[in-house]
Amino acid sequence: MAVPDAASPSLDAVWEDRPGIPGFLTTVDHKRIAVRYLVTATAFLFIGGLEAMVLRAQLAGPNGTVVDADTYNRIMTMHGTTMIFLFNTPVFAGFGNYLVPLLIGAREMAFPRVNAFSYWVYLGSGSLLYSSFLLHAVPDGGWFAYTPLTSSAYSPDVGLDLWAMGIVFLGISTTAGGINFIVTIFRMRAPGMTLSRLPLFCWAILTMSFMIVFALPAITLAGVLLELDRTFGMQFFSPAGGGDPLLYQHLFWIWGHPEVYILFIPATGIISMVVATFSGRRVVAYHLVVAALVATGFISFGLWMHHMFATGVPFLVASFFSAASLVVAIPSGVQIFAWLATMLTGRVRLEVPMLFAIGFVVTFVIGGMTGVMVGVVPFDQQVTDSYFVVAHFHYVLIGGTVFPAFAGLHYWFPKAIGRMPSRRLGVWSFWFTFVGTQLTFFPQHILGLEGMPRRVWTYPEGLGWDGPNALSTAGSVVLGVGLLLSVVAFALAWRRGEPADADPWGGETLEWAIPSPPPPYNFAGVPIVRSDAPMWDDDPPRAITHLDGEDLTVPHDGHHRAVLTSPLDAAGLEAVSMPEPSYTPLVVAGSLTLLCVAVIASSWPIGLVAVVVASAALIRWHDGIGS
Amino acid sequence: MPNRSRRLPWRRCLVGATLALPLAGCSDGHSVLSAKGPEAARVSALGWGMIVVSSVISAVVFGLLAASLFPSVRERFRRHDETALVRWGGVALPVVVLLALSGLTVAAMVPSDDRDGTLELTVVGHQYWWEVTYPGTGAVTANEIHIPAGRRVRVALESPDVIHSFWVPSLAGKIDMVPGRTNHLVLEADRPGTYRGQCAEYCGAQHARMAFVVVAQEPAEFQRWLRHQAEPLAAAATDRPGRAVFERESCAGCHTVRGTEADGAIGPDLTHLADRDTIGALTLPNDRREVRAWVRDAQQFKAGAEMPPIDLSSEDLDAIVDYLEHLR
């Protein structure tokens, strides 16, 4: 490996965080922040999973008595909210944070403090949502919180205020993260990494980030208007006051449908990396796959009304959205066949990440097929809001995001931690997860076709729903065990796994060029990229160590130095000083959380304190950043 | 038990559904894929077609996936242009299949023509029951929608509170009831029978206990039923002692019994309650024991419903139940 990783110890000294709690609270290291994202998101996955187990226990048989109607509805709301907002979106923010700088040969994200801020806001909004349990006011409006059910008339307790504020607040984190990824990918790529050599994972994150920037304002607006209706008696969604409940649905799904792809696209990025490595070749039809990613991003903004086919949509509108819903299957088809062609022309190694990738393809294809079916308006009017749709989106979301996330965790764990997770446990975990997923969700297709609506807290016997429900509940236990086994594998490996070398899988991209775990500055010199699979070039990538008379491998005035390049062809190198660790991101995020609490509690003194603290911290945001 | 002859055979299913009796043959009363009317039949044909085609495509993908694990197959593939599979499988195949499907979709969406003699009725979704009115007749009922078999019925769907969704899987797809709007849906049953329906849009605590039935009858029988439903209080009930209790207690504040002082508009019209086979939107069978328990404390069966527990002496309770049994 010719990238000089034998940097002087003094570089370590400049980049390393302070030890202990202060270092923990002030760090701007994208890798530490990423691990935080991944750990927090996984914790929320298991909290959401536990909620799902309660729901499945209640529905295991007819007339269940595990929970009452009210409890069921609240837990059902938190399950969906947790999985979409607190697990699924953040888990890929975690992967993106860890990997984007490594894959493009950069030392940092473009805005390290914004990055730290994004994480703290995520933690703050998650805490806000879950504080509803302490207040005995868990939201009960379903994860998409349709009005008028969520208006103050029908849902008077504070739970929905926490929900709306939590979602709006989380949007700040997601949006900031998206902008950070866009700038990082456009300005910090290693020299020679033109856009057409950008690793597919980075293309996926780039597409996702643009989608976030354009889609998030819609849900922010929906949440703000809902909160204005609830707390100030405005009438945006109330027909009595000239408002319209369907306006909320439009705003929600203008975000909500792109959101599905905001979750799915980074997952496909992970799959592309895993399939390439374990097929021992580059992904076939790279340019088509990139085109497919970008096309998915665009088309996904033209689908939102297919969530509303049953609301009484005019014929022409329904036809348009139906056609768009079918068209979006084409780019997914391109990606699936590109991976198949890669595997068919490569040499497949069935390591744990690859097993999860194959499990993804199988599960996602089934979910994709039912996805096409629900794009067909008359069929959708039958199955929407039934268990068929529950089956469909769990196939797409578990198949399309949980399998890839676990493929990614097994694949990059050795890089991040420097130890190998147990292959045996990983294989067991895969099989339990895979079988559990099919067993839990396949019978739900039948339930939907047999007329079982979603979100019912109970059902009578004699409708033919008992058997599939029992099977589904049994499957959910298997699924839970499967995911838990992976976590056990990671926990064991973290403490005493086999040490991993720099490139345990034989990967194609730059993260495998540096030690496992990577040093805090990632790359001592700036790698020069000459192909889209730099690690598989005939001779390994070389590195630039001197730029404009500055030796990059030694500290420069004690600052974090990173290299910027031009947006399209990654040329025109320029060394700049990056922001260093600081308390300000934490203070700003904390005071904004307090501001949310103040709004919900209608407490102006607390709100004033929060605003003053946030402003003071923002004024000092740039402290300690070199010129 | 009063008036057994009027009860329909499907009653066994519903009672079975609530009282855990074994039953057979009811489950095809609410299935998307076993259509009982022309509206649902169009969709079930499309549904079966899509299930078959997508199974074939999935099988091909899974076959290729499995093939990639065998080196001998891989050797054969390596000799071909590697992007061909992506172009044919990933682009050409979905384009052809989806274009065809798009055409079929639009064809299936074209609304069928209004035929002469289309019956119109209105269903209003409430938290958590269904109000059914037959415009121009004065007939009002709840949770039981009678229609003539073999005739097109245009249903106007409304909601005064939150969004509900009207779904009878074996007869038609669902349409939402959105406050401030009126949506329409066409129901048609080929043959007399009973078809189960349920609210499909999460509408609050008891969304799960907001079911109903569509009862398709021979047209002549339906006309008799409709004429009867339009009539006010049955003569047999006029001087039951429970009537006074009903009107004195809180019952009359929420429920209407046409032809009496009870004209509440919050709960279901009870003028012909005894004709109905269930109470509480299919929550309980309409039997003396259950009705008594329901009147005393409906919350134990349907927590969150509007009907409050009613504090009555045992005699008053019996009188009310007797009165309700005579509302034919």
Image: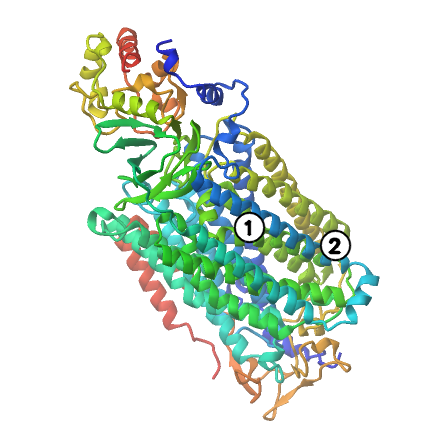
Instruction: Kindly indicate whether the residues beneath marks 1 and 2 are on one polypeptide chain.
Output: yes
Q: What amino acid does circle 2 point to?
A: Arg
User: For the residue carrying disc 1, how many other residues have a C-alpha within 10 Å: few (<14), some (14-19), or many (20+)?
Assistant: many
Residue A144 in the image: above or below residue A300: above
Given residues A396 and A18, the one toward you in this image is A396
Q: Quadrant of residue A468?
A: top right
Q: Which mark is residue A496?
A: 2
Given residues A346 and A594, the one toward you in this image is A346
Answer yes or no: is residue A476 visible. yes
Q: Nearer the viewer, mark 1 or mark 2?
A: 1
Residue A414 in the image: above or below residue B159: below
Residue B31 in the image: above or below residue A492: above
The residue identified by callout 1 is A370
Relative to A210, B289 lies left or right: left
Residue A522, percent from left and from top: 64, 74
Residue A61 in the image: above or below residue A101: above
Residue A416, percent from left and from top: 66, 63
Estimate the spatial distance between the alpha carbons at disc 1 and disc 2, rounded to whole Å: 43 Å
Q: How is the image coloured?
A: rainbow
Residue B230, percent from left and from top: 23, 24
Q: Quadrant of residue B320?
A: top left
Q: Quadrant of residue B212?
A: top left
Seen at 33% across and 29% down, the residue is B305
User: How many marks can you see?
Assistant: 2
Element carrying mark 1: helix
Residue B203, percent from left and from top: 37, 39
Seen at 74% across and 71% down, the residue is A281
